[in-house]
Amino acid sequence: MRRDEIAALDLTRYGKFTDRAIDFGEKPASGPDFHIVFGLNEAGKSTALSAYLDLLFGIEERSRYNFLHDYSSMRIGGLLEFEGQAFAVSRTKSRSNSLHDAEGRPLSEIAISAHLAGLSRDGPGVAASRSSRLTLPAVVVGTLRTMVERRSGITTSLRMARDEAAAALDGLNAARGRVGEERAVPEPARAKLMAAVSEAKASGHICRYNCLSA
């Protein structure tokens, strides 16, 4: 069975990423080998997809992913697997010799295109029929969207709970501070208070009150 895939994607200098990589891990011994890349808005999902396409077909002439790294320094890489054979490649922004092997030597585009069965970035023919197999059913897309939205909601709720807990802790610390201030009565005032209590006891006012209460 034909099996072409990418095992790792290196975002060396591309878009907002610098020296970042996505490792899809080894193929499981049994069961499906299927990965879902998801994240919050602006996390870099579209950037990663564009980097994958640029790795296969070349960085576009007017790429919009040069806002951090200029064209001359843009670089992506990856570990590709074609028919069970894995090899590492990298790609720079250049009109010629933009594809390189693991040692940095120029590599012919045939090294990749020969395994794509006519697949192009947005071309017709075999590409259309093959890409249709990569399109998820609408119900699956809806389910994935719901998963992401729920995860986003959970993240937001956790963030709000964290902020509320921090505010409650600040309030508790402030209350403790006030209690401490109230307990720290100046000694002269404490002495006057105790003297007043002693005087009241000596005059019998407290006793008469206690006796009447009894």
Image (cartoon, rainbow, N blue to C red):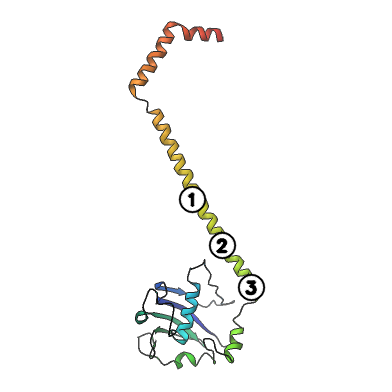
Give the alpha-carbon distance from disc 1 to disc 3, as whole Å.
35 Å
- The kind of residue tagged 2 is Arg
Q: Are marks 1 and 3 in contact (CB under 8 Å)?
A: no
* Along the line of sight, the residue nearer the viewer: 42 or 179: 42
What is the secondary structure assignment of the residue under circle 3? helix
What is the secondary structure assignment of the residue under circle 1? helix
The quarter of the picture where the C terminus appears is: top right
* Along the line of sight, the residue nearer the viewer: 87 or 93: 93
The quarter of the picture where the N terminus appears is: bottom right
Q: Is residue 81 positioned above or below 202 on the image?
A: below
Left or right for 132, reference 48: right
Residue that carries the numbered disc 2 in the rendered image = 151
Q: Is residue 5 positioned above or below 44 on the image?
A: below
Residue that carries the numbered disc 3 in the rendered image = 140
- The kind of residue tagged 3 is Val
Residue 71 location (% of width, % of height): 37, 81
Residue that carries the numbered disc 1 in the rendered image = 163
Give the alpha-carbon distance from disc 2 to disc 3, as whole Å.
16 Å
Q: Quadrant of residue 194?
A: top left
Q: Residue furthest right?
A: 139
Q: Could you tell which of marks 2 and 3 lies nearer the N-terminus?
A: 3
Label 3 crowd bin: few (<14), some (14–19), many (20+), radius 10 Å:
few
- The kind of residue tagged 1 is Asp
